[in-house]
Amino acid sequence: MKTVRGRCIYGADGRSDYTLAPLNEHLLFEFGADPDRALEAAVQPGVGLIGPEDLGALPIVDFELMLAHFCIGNFGDVVGHNITCGSCRKIFGVEFSLRTFISALTAEIVKHDSPDFNGAPLALPTRDMIRNANEKSDLVGLVWKNAMPEPGDLSTLEKYLERACPVLEENIRAACPACTTEQSFHFALRDWITAKLKARVKVLLAQIHILASSYHWRFDEILALSRQTRSALIETIRNQGTRSMPGWRE
């Protein structure tokens, strides 16, 4: 991934543009499979840009769109999942484009452009609000300053926020190819990125072990190599191991 640029829907303090650097594999061992810290490390500071310090206060839809942009740049556009059919018990795979998913979601957003909702001050939910709220009622209190909501107001508010500031998750539906019964799985962007980060750590640990054992290089020397170089060296090591096996012939 090269350094990429994007734009938020709402932004912070009049700033909506951002720049993302590639995943820092040195820091990956420090913060682990944590999407928040991975994104913070990727966001590049600059005049007029969204900075790492802004992420917690961004409306959650902006934060998750940045996460999606980061995910596509580092792990690719395709989301894949295996579903076990509840009817015939056959397993089948489902794939979709994260970029297409984002485009469809953002096209349906009705932008919130008023400080109020039904006569009471409304602040769009942010990453930190969601993180700090133990219950949905806690989050409602942080978002909507209405001391005396009417019956049905909370349901109306929830539907409004789903349109104005959605979280990137969805029930993805697909027909089983064996029996044609419709099946579904729940896709949540944060869970997908967490799984991708865990997989990257696992691959890195394996690469470090092989290269350190073969060449006696230090941790930082190995991570200084590009992913392509590490993969090529490991392929060379494996080929050399095959040639040294008894009975091997050109």
Image (cartoon, rainbow, N blue to C red):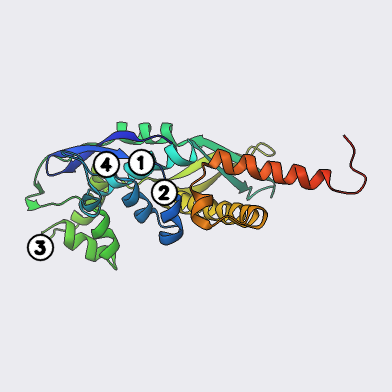
Q: Residue at x 29, y 38 (%)?
A: 19
* Percent x, y of residue 148: 10, 63
Which residue position holds label 1?
21
Cβ–Cβ under 8 Å for marks 3 and 4? no
Image quadrant where one finds the C terminus: top right
Closer to the chain start, of discs 4 and 2, is: 2
Q: Is residue 104 left or right of residue 62?
A: right
The reply to whether the C-beta atoms of the residues labelled 4 and 2 are less than 8 Å apart is no
Task: Residue at 29% x, 34% y: name it.
Answer: 6
Comparing marks 3 and 2, which lies closer to the viewer? 2
Measured from the top left, where is residue 225 in percent x and y? 52, 44
Label 4: few (<14), some (14–19) or many (≥20) C-alpha neighbours in 10 Å: some
In percent of the image, x 62 and y 52: which residue is there? 211
Q: Earlier in the sequence, mark 3 or mark 1?
A: 1
Q: Amino acid at mark 3?
A: Met
Q: Position of residue 92 (x, y in %)?
A: 65, 42
Q: Nearer the viewer, residue 211 or 206?
A: 211
Check if mark 1's residue and mark 2's residue have beta carbons within 8 Å. Answer: yes
Q: Residues within 10 Å of mark 3 (few under 14, many from 20)?
A: few
Q: CA distance from mark 3 to mark 2?
A: 48 Å
4 and 1 marks in contact (CB < 8 Å): no
The residue closer to the viewer here, 99 or 228, is: 228
222 up-or-down from 74: above or below:
below
The quarter of the picture where residue 10 lies is: top left
> Considering the numbered disc 1 on the image, is that residue within a helix, a strand or a loop?
loop
From the viewer's perspective, is 98 left or right of 232?
A: left
Q: Secondary structure at mark 3?
A: loop
Q: Which residue is mark 4?
A: 163
Q: At numbered mark 2, what does the secondary structure look like: helix, strand or loop?
A: loop
Location of mark 2 (residue) = 24
